[in-house]
Amino acid sequence: MAITGFVMWLLLHFTNLIVIMRRARNNPVGYVSSAVMFQSKLKEGMTHLNVIGLSRSLGERLSSEGAEPEIFLWKDSNDNRVTVTFVSGKVQSWEFKRPKLILPDHDEPATAG
């Protein structure tokens, strides 16, 4: 009975892993639909697999291979960026950056055209 329960638990986790990776393969590396929503759902201590499932994309690696901490980047179509730092495969911190917006000066009079 214990062996059957363990095999069932193992199959459930394997199936979960396959589903997450299947979803991630359909999106470009490091792309999320909304970086704002993605960063709002991040929590300290989440595993790397949970973050991939949340973003539905593999992150773009910024750190060198095998370096600790691991740093990954996700961005959206508006160039909003979320940089996530993983220590031992778990989220330690993240940083959200928006691109600088270039707005017209309000001192200049509007021209009629």
Image: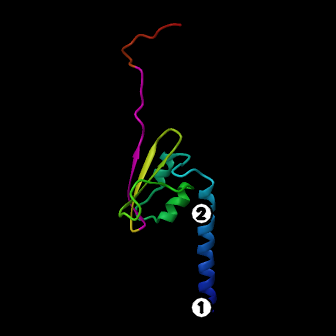
Name which of mark 2 and mark 1 comes first in the sequence.
1
Pointer 2 local density, CA inside 10 Å: few below 14, some 14–19, many at least 20: some
Per the image, label 1 sits on a secondary structure element best described as helix
Residue occupying the point 53% across, 40% down: 77
77 to the left or right of 93: right
Residue 28: give x, y in percent of width and height.
Answer: 57, 50
Q: Is 103 in the magenta?
A: yes
Q: Amino acid at mark 2?
A: Ile
Q: Amino acid at mark 1?
A: Ala
Q: Residue at coordinates 51% horizontally, 65% vertically from top-left? A: 49
Residue 105 lies in quadrant: top left
Residue occupying the far front of the picture: 65
Q: Can you say whether 2 is above or below 30 in the image?
A: below
Label 1 Cα neighbours within 10 Å, binned few <14 / some 14-19 / many ≥20: few
To which residue does mark 1 refer? 2
Q: Is residue 41 above or below residue 101?
A: below
| Residue found 63% across the figure and 71% down from its top | 15
Residue 92 image position (x, y, % from top left): 37, 61
Which of 112/20 is in front? 20
Q: Quadrant of residue 19?
A: bottom right
The residue that disc 2 covers is 20
Q: Quadrant of the N terminus?
A: bottom right
Magenta range: 89-104
Tell me the element at label 2.
Answer: helix
Q: Where residue 18 sits in the image (x, y, percent)?
A: 62, 67
Colour convention: rainbow
